[in-house]
Image: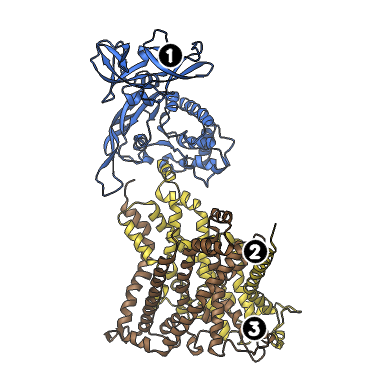
Amino acid sequence: MKKNNLKGWLYLLPAIIFLAAFMIYPLVDVFIYSFEEEYNFASQTHTGIGTYNYSYVLHDTYFLQALKNTFILVIITVPLSTITSLLIAMALSSIKKLRQLFQTVFFLPYVTNTLAVGLVFMILFKKTAYSDGMINMLINLFGGESVDFIDGPYWAKMLVLCIYTVWIVMPFKILILTGALASVKDDLYKAAKIDSTPKWRVFTRITLPMISPMIFYLVITGFIGAFKAYSDAVALFGTDLNVAGMNTIVGYIYDMLYGNSGGYPSYASAAALILFVIVLTITCINLMVSRKSVVKV
Amino acid sequence: MKVVLENLTKIFPNRNRKIKTEVVAVDDFTFEIPDGTLVGLLGPSGCGKSTTLNLISGLEKPTRGKVFFGDTDVTDLEPEDRGVGLVFQNYALYPHLTVRNNIMFPLKNFRGDKKLTKDVMEKKVLEAAKLVQIDTLMDRKPGELSGGQQQRVAIARALVKEPKVLLLDEPLSNLDARLRLQTREEIRRIQRETKVTTIFVTHDQEEAMSISDIIVVMKEGVVHQIGKPQDVYDDPKNLFVAKFLGTPPINVFKGNVRDGMICIGGKPVLKAEKTDDCEVFVGIRPEGFIVDENGKLELNLKGLEVMGRDTTIVSTHEASENVEIRSIVSAETTITAGKEKVKFSLKPMKTFIFNSETGERIYFGSQVRKEYGKK
Amino acid sequence: MKKPGNIVLNILKYVFLAFWGIVVLFPFYWMILSSVKSYGAYNSEYIPKFFTANPTLENYSSAFTTVSLGRYFFNTIVFAVVTTAVMLVVITLAAFAFARLQFRGKNIVFTLFLSLMMIPNELIIITNFVTITNMNMRNTFTGLILPSITSIFYIYLLKENFEQIPENLYKAAKVDGTSDFKYLIRVMIPMCKPTMITITILKIIECWNSYVWPRLITDNEKYYLVSNGIQEIRENGFGRENIPAMMAAVVVISIPLIILFLVFRKQIMTGVQRSGTKG
């Protein structure tokens, strides 16, 4: 077939224009912003080039709080959601009755508005003057003391945030793992059965290695996703996350850009690049670990 | 519309860019296809027959040479401007369109003064569908049709725009054996009715022989022989053509010519006057054997396959290139069971000798070369 | 013969799955329940009740009258429909070029596209915010829509799908005089309809739930989308304590997506699965 250079580029043109304007240019620009010191949004001027923005961000207590929050969130939710979803996926794969129903129900959180359902979680956990809330009622039932999970102690707020985050990310993980389990060839299980392999051994020696690429994929994307947590925190604690002490790195970036303390694209850029470096490092470590332990199929 | 190919050559660069060698898919093909004939391009896979078809349709552009439709040079025309109909091996029907819309698809592309009204289109579609006898299936989707029916739709779609040339790429190879027989007769009938110049590609010699007016035998891009099926069968130009045509295939022996005699295994079997001494391959068509007590060719009898109408004698010989030698004799011929040897004499017109190095035919006795196109 | 151990295990499995089912469904139940309790009834329950004897729909009417839920809804629909429609055009053309056309530089551009897929939104959103602000497009639909129009992942997905269409169909169309564009419209798009539908739905869901970009780019309530709307309602809407009315708004916002999900369950789930396993 003859080459038609112009025509090919013409079809690509709209995509290229949008990508250049809203992806490639911003990508270059964010580096420039991050090194422009004392950038003024209104006059669009800056006084010098240097690393001051980075040092400012790294010394900002709000940023350090956000960093701490994000790391705690990541460390708790990623393993918890991955293991729980694996258990659910395995239970799902081994049953026949009601399987479709469960699968459909479990996927529901994926298609809900994070902000809207977050509000429901807030109601469930919140302690007000009128009511201690649903969850506290349960705690009381087992003889515990009521806690204000939304405006109360740090650990309580972090707990709610973790619970909500897990609730939100589970559907995707369950779906992917159920798919991975279904793709393991039945022959392998039959062969194991003929050799009368015990169930636990079948799991550790066949199932787990066969789906290990998918598990690692979920861990990697889970880390990336959790590092970018933001709207679930907003849903629970409102837009002013710094005051609530529940800000995340992404939240810090947006607040710097626009918000109560906003108007500083340079600080936002520096923070965004710091986040990018963190995520990149963790992803690389993940990839290195997975390369060693994942079975090549 | 006659189709003329003039020194048609197509060279592909090697897929692997590091290797500089080129692949000559079609090498210097010159041929004039008379108007209204059915031509079969025949050859083993990779012989360049499909490339030839693509060159005629315009899907590929030749490296050298020209293609004429009638007296018009179409070499530089795009496929859509050539007015060809093309049927693919896997039919290439649009799966989301009904049979009716599949057949109508080419008509909707007409532009300008060629543009048709809806009524004319409907009429033409129905005509084409009737021609291939699928007019009762118009509202089905291709997925709901059998292979043979899909094939008919593909032919109808190719014919509906009244092409100057109809091209069929392995039209029968996706059908089962019974349908294949039926469909090839169908193609012959449709071609006769429409009188459109038709070129089809196949690797199945039986298929080509049975319906073509002219067959073109190709191998590795080179045209080996062109002619009427019977002529090519009776008078193969070289060992490849002789081996490629005919079921059961021709029996080939290693042999030589000595003192005007063709010898197999050192023993003279047939006279070949005025032929120089040389090493040859001897090819004997299965029907070229006569059971003869005084025959000069003695074979080791292995078994008989009685078909009723005729009998196949299966035998072996140390000089044979084939594992088994199959000779077809009339059913009346009696061979005593338990015999280990059987003797044959040979029909001179069914026995060919080929140069053992080049594979070129050596004509002997009353054998005369028939050149295609020369009366 | 089933061993008794298996039956116990089976029961445990169902209990476990049912437990998670309750965890998933309970928030939905609670929001619907709270939304039909009257303001008075809700606030008088110091210990929340799991059912209500006198359901009322008054919260739903106040959700549309007291706050501009209708407007948020309308804005979101406009945003989702326009973004998705324009995106479909852009990605279809690009996917077609990658899958079907031959031109110089194709592979380089495609590799570049793929590498852009790894760029996180946080990095580019800063400049985009500045760009849109400088172009005076804050609080406009154009400003909302523009940066969300291309999705490299969907280009990739569609290109893969386009490439599965047999080459011979293209040749057949070519011989019949079909132009490239007509082939795209009449053959490729209809044949890839399932993928197109999946992409459309996933994009609509994405638009419906988008929060960050709309929050940055709109501070005028007239241009709020549902996500920002719900945040606005929470902070300044009915007064902080009118939980039942808030829940009514939450139900109204959640329902369209849940209906969409129940109708296109298969497409959505396979689409998400594919985006997970390939992306």
Query: Tag 1's secondary structure?
Result: strand
* Quadrant occupied by the N terminus of chain B: top left
Q: Give the residue at mark 3.
A: A135
Query: In the depicted view, which residue is nearer to us: A276 or B359?
Result: B359
Position above or below: B370 against A105: above
Query: Tag 3's secondary structure?
Result: helix
**Which residue type carries mark 1?**
Val
Marks 1/2: CA–CA distance: 77 Å
- Colour that chain C carries in the picture: yellow
- Colour that chain B carries in the picture: blue
Marks 3/1: CA–CA distance: 101 Å
Question: Mark 2 or 3 closer to N-term?
Answer: 2
Q: Give the residue at mark 1.
A: B342
- Mark 3 residue crowding within 10 angstroms, few (<14) / some (14–19) / many (20+): many
Residue C128 visible from this viewpoint: no
Residue B165 visible from this viewpoint: yes
For this view, does B217 lie left or right of residue C71?
A: left
Residues indicated by labels 3 and 1 sit on the same polypeptide chain: no
The reply to whether callout 1 and callout 2 are in contact (CB within 8 Å) is no
**Which residue type carries mark 2?**
Leu
Q: How is the image coloured?
A: by chain
Query: In the depicted view, which residue is nearer to us: B175 or A147?
Result: A147
Query: In the depicted view, which residue is nearer to us: B69 or C110?
Result: C110
Subunit bearing disc 3 = A
The reply to whether callout 2 and callout 3 are in contact (CB within 8 Å) is no
Indicate which disc residue A101 carries. Answer: 2
Residue occupying image coordinates x 46% and y 81%: A71
Residue occupying image coordinates x 64% and y 67%: C13
